[in-house]
Image (cartoon, grey):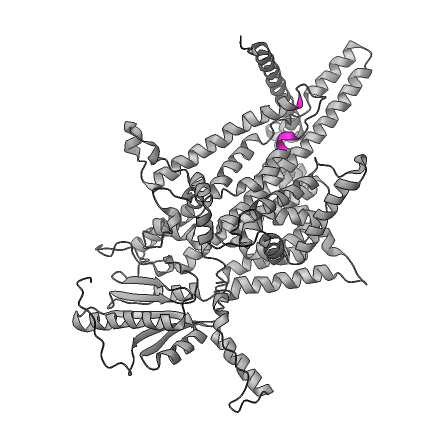
Amino acid sequence: MVWLPVPHILKVAWDATKLGVALKGYKRERALVEAKKNQVIAYKRKAATRQVKKLFEEEKYEEFARLYIPDLVMDKLHDLKDLWWSIWDIYWLFILLRILIIFNPYNSGYIHPDEYFQSVEVTVGDVFNIDVHRTWEFNTTQPLRSPTVSYTLYGIPLTILRVINTCLYHYLGINIVGPLLVDLLPRLVLLVLSFSVDFMVYQICVLYKHNFNQCLTTLASSYIMIIYSTRSFSNTLELVFTSVLVYLVAHCLRRTDETIYLHELVQDKYDKAETIRERVEINKKRKKIPPHDYKYLIPIGILCGVGIFNRPTFVFYAFASLFFWLQRGVSNHSVFSPFQTFNFRVVLLVPVIVATFLVMIFCDSLYYGDLTWRKLWNLNMNYTDWKVAPFNFIMYNAVPGNIASHGEHPRYTHILVNLPMLLGPLAPVFLVTFLNWILDACYLPWKKKPSLRNVYALSLFTTVVPLIALSAVKHQEARFLIPVLPCIVLLCAHKLRWKAYGFKPLLTLWYIYNILAMVWFGFVHQAGVMPVQKFIGRQQHADVPYINLIYSHTYMPPRYPLFQPANLKLEEYPGYISNKRTKYMVQDLGSVATHILKDKLTDIVSRTEYISSKKKVKMETYLIIPEFLLDQLKAEAAGAFSFEPLYSSFPHVSVESLDKLELEFHDALGHLGLDSVLTGVGNMLAGFTLSVVNVTTGHAVQSVNIPSSNNM
């Protein structure tokens, strides 16, 4: 006979019922206490008016404000006021810098193609019905990316913008939509979200009486917060989700410690009570102790579900936080055994995560089109209609060949290259901190070993677990690690203030490094791509139905700044479409050699000339290439092409093409002097420009034989 634990389950259900009744009584008593805080409520009509006037005349503005503003809001405003006056100096300068940079039109640094092609490119294309490039990750059969998160964050504001623009254009003839505003709006959303990272770090510091001035100043001065946190990477959202999750778990740890202490204190008094009356009073106090076992259960579950759909690697960042939340307060002195308490939390958390998964799967499936409302109404769906993007992501990356196609790196790349590149001098400080913790855990006496149930251990393992897990994957990029920043700041910010001979060398190095990195990633690295795209998009090409756009030695260019309509055969277009009949044919050649580029240009330009002359269809060919490579192409072509300059954007540095840079610091006679060095440096800097040229057949080409083709 199989044993069924029915009596035990009934006992647990009865205990849960008693707990619910006790909580209801506690909430009623708490509501009475909250009501007593507002003394004006006790007054009626004229007496209440006199009391309000008295508060105002006595300049008790806080009590006056609490009459109309909830206490929770006032308490948060108090926290913000304390935050302002405590760190009013350099922290707010960096916050102001973060705000000003997103409004700076020269902030066009292009960090990585995923900044656009995993979110904004697709969302803008759908909202404004323009032609964009959908990467293979958004295939409709087995998609690897969930569009629900990006649509919620970027699609809703962009849709509101489109509706407002439609009304303005219809009634006033005013168009406000353009590449600048469309590029700015997602960054504004992310700017607001980035402030939540600061606030979470501040709240953790306040909870545990840590020096929030040092932590917030270190956090805000990082170029990750200044540049990365306002760029539309999925890793940026992962940073926000991780910081919020760490705060929720840290708050639960603190609440659990306080609750256990109060229970022990009440139990001690209960054991020492001599009369039944005293024990009854003590039990009443016990009921007023706030619960802690399932605090923030729903927010944590929803956050984990959304975070995994945003980026499945969020599992690594959430693992330590979830474990700390599940095992907090587990001891042999509780009503349930440690195993039971842990399992109860798991059983209640899993349905919340699963429910979030189902909502995300439903939204994604509707987006990709295989699942329709008609199928739902008729209940004739099949399993292929449901799109589970995280599962497809994991299965794709489980194939070694797929990882290799994106580039393989040594397993130490994250620790020895990417972490120092992101954190500068803070990276070795963190590594030394972790090694010291390991040594203390191994060699100190048992009672002096570092605790595994405090916020320090939470921050440490939230950093170490994903660092080790992501290092096991051979494809490693620096942006994968940006969610570790808040925890490392909590652990090591004070160590940057180490003094030597009255100076703080590490802090000085930290500021210098982050300013240089901010300039590099925000204003220099591939910084000409977006200005060039915006320039091409705002030009009038009414008489040119086809334009070849050839990109060489640049990152893959986003298409949405061109604002090319998805359908070129409409009779009427929205006001933000300026080139209604022009089709841009984009060819991204990557980092091809100069002679290959020359051959490719020969084919394209020759066909363009043939179509323009024989079939009377005007075509143009634009080449987008760094200036120093354009000079090399001119020398290689030897007059085969004519290059008409149209636009240039400075600065633009493509690291992938630096091996082709030819430096010359000698004069015509081969002498090296100050003038020749300055001239060489000037020529080198001038070469770091992204140029747009109109390419036509040069004077050296007499005739071109084009095979007949019916494809036009």
Asked whether the viewer can see residue 214, the reply is no
Dominant secondary structure of the residues highlighted in magenta in the image: loop
Magenta span contains residue 337:
yes
Tell me residue 484's x, y (percent): 60, 48
Judge left or right: residue 495 versus residue 155. Answer: right
* Residue found farthest to the bottom: 669
Tell me residue 546's x, y (percent): 26, 65
Kindly identify the residue that appears in the image at 60 percent across and 15 percent down.
Answer: 12
Q: Which residues are magenta?
A: 325-338
**Residue 599, image quadrant:** bottom left
Judge left or right: residue 311 versus residue 482. Answer: left
Magenta span contains residue 223:
no
Q: How many marks?
A: 0
Tell me residue 238's x, y (percent): 53, 45
Given residues 445 and 98, the one toward you in this image is 445
Q: In the rendered image of this protein, does residue 194 appear above or below residue 283?
A: below
Kindly identify the residue that appears in the image at 27 percent across and 28 percent down.
Answer: 378
Say which quadrant the C terminus sits in. Answer: bottom left
Tell me residue 464's x, y (percent): 63, 45
Judge left or right: residue 581 versus residue 222. Answer: left
Asked whether the viewer can see residue 23, the reply is yes
Kindly identify the residue that appears in the image at 50 percent across and 70 percent down.
Answer: 658
Q: In the rendered image of this protein, does residue 511 appear above or below residue 388?
A: below
* Residue found farthest to the top: 1
**Residue 37, image quadrant:** top right
